[in-house]
Image: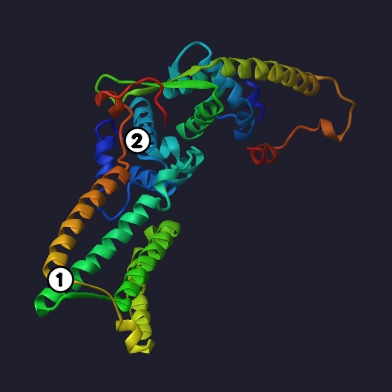
């Protein structure tokens, strides 16, 4: 591999589907699956590039199999990379609740009736919240398998949507009509809709900011210095 | 089949020999001041240890880092991707001194034993080429 053909870190992070994964892509993917932080991944990629630029070797020549090399580095997983924080769960629950609130209020507005929240609607919110957490947990746990079996992953996704929907519908049909429809709260529909939309929007902004914080981009070892952050011992 | 005993050899040393001695050799290469991975590999190659691949060297440097034997710092390269410099810490120097003593004692004993006069017997027969290969 010549110097010019070695992708820069920035190029490696913007992965493009080319059919076959390159050594760099496999290396990066394996480190991601191991839960290594973007900063440490960037440093590991930069060191590979640096070595190849000086030795004139190809990556497989100098480092062997990309996955095995990634594992041999023994980089520890970043705790922020896996599982859900309380903040994430609160935001997910808030958004589901607000979305249901807005839909219910909108129905009220269309029908010209006050908004009514039923036991069934609240149960629905809890069920959806539980399913989202379960799906997130399973996806996190079986991420490697899902990445390596993309077709099966699509089938599983369809099943994951269809089966719980069916179960919820069946439970709703079996439960006594009165209990399911008994009203918990009644409110004027238009103010409820306006308030719901405003809160939903606010929650959306919080959500985007939260995701940005979690994004953990792959950075070069020099990004921190360029950003004006304190330099010194560079980890990775 | 005794070419491995010649210092100026071109073939690679048996991999399991290198595995044992590489740690102390890399520590020694780092002892002359802050340096980077490729320079360490070049230094070892010039010393006659053969080509040490990046796939072997960097995981070892990584272990040194985790053990606190080296401090690291990135230096930007002129148009290149930059270099990660490794510098031995006091813990690293202590580890080098300890391994130096141990290896030197081990090598002395081994050399004295294998070159020493032995009683005549089947053990004196030269090692066949197949046995040599099997040890790689």
Residue A165 in sight from this viewpoint = yes
Query: For this view, does B79 lie left or right of residue B130?
Result: left
Depth order, front residue of A184/B52: A184
* Horizontal and vertical percent position of residue A178: 33, 87
* Horizontal and vertical percent position of residue A16: 24, 50
Indicate the secondary structure of the residue bearing disc 2.
helix
Q: Mark 2 highlights which residue?
A: A42
| Residue drawn at point x = 76 percent, y = 32 percent | B126
| Residue drawn at point x = 54 percent, y = 26 percent | B64
Mark 2 neighbour class, 10 Å CA radius: few under 14, some 14 to 19, many 20 or more: many
Query: For the residues carrying marks 2 and 1, which lies nearer the camera in this image?
Result: 1
* A220 up-or-down from A16: above or below: above
* A196 up-or-down from A38: above or below: below
Specify the farthest residue to the top: B32
* Horizontal and vertical percent position of residue B134: 66, 41
Mark 1 neighbour class, 10 Å CA radius: few under 14, some 14 to 19, many 20 or more: some
* Horizontal and vertical percent position of residue A37: 39, 40
Q: Mark 1 highlights which residue?
A: A188
Depth order, front residue of B69/A193: A193
Picture mark count = 2
* A209 up-or-down from B75: above or below: below
**Figure quadrant of residue A94:** bottom left
């Amino acid at each position: 591999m010549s110097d010019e053909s070695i992708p820069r870190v920035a190029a490696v992070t913007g992965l493009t589907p080319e059919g076959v994964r390159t050594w760099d892509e496999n290396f990066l993917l394996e480190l991601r699956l191991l839960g290594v932080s973007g900063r440490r991944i960037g440093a590991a990629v930069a060191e590979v590039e640096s070595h190849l630029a000086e030795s004139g070797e190809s990556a497989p020549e100098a480092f062997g199999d990309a996955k095995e090399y990634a594992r041999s580095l023994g980089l520890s997983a970043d705790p922020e990379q896996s599982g859900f924080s309380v903040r994430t769960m609160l935001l997910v629950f808030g958004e589901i609740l607000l979305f249901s609130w807005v839909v219910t209020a909108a129905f009220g507005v269309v029908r010209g009736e006050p908004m009514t929240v039923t036991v069934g609607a609240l149960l629905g919110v809890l069920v959806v919240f539980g399913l989202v957490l379960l799906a997130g947990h399973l996806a996190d746990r079986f991420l490697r398998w899902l990445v390596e079996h993309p077709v099966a992953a699509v089938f599983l996704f369809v099943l994951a949507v269809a089966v719980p929907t069916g179960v919820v519908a069946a439970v709703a049909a079996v439960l006594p009509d009165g209990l399911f429809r008994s009203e918990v709260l009644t409110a004027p529909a238009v103010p409820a809709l306006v308030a719901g939309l405003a809160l939903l929007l606010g929650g959306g902004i919080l959500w985007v900011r939260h995701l940005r914080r979690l994004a953990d981009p792959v950075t070069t070892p020099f990004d921190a210095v360029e950003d004006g952050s304190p330099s010194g011992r560079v980890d990775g | 089949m005794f070419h491995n005993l010649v210092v100026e050899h071109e073939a690679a040393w048996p991999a399991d020999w290198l595995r044992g001695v590489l740690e102390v050799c890399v520590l020694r290469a780092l002892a002359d001041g802050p340096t980077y991975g490729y320079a360490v590999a070049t230094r070892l190659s010039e010393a006659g240890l053969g080509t040490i691949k990046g796939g072997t060297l960097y995981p070892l440097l990584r272990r040194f880092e985790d053990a606190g034997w080296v401090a690291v710092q990135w230096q930007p390269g002129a148009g290149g991707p930059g270099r990660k410099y490794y510098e031995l810490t006091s813990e690293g120097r202590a580890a080098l001194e300890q391994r130096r003593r141990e290896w030197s004692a081990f090598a002395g004993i081994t050399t004295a034993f294998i070159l020493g006069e032995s009683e005549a017997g089947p053990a004196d027969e030269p090692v066949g080429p197949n046995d040599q290969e099997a040890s790689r």
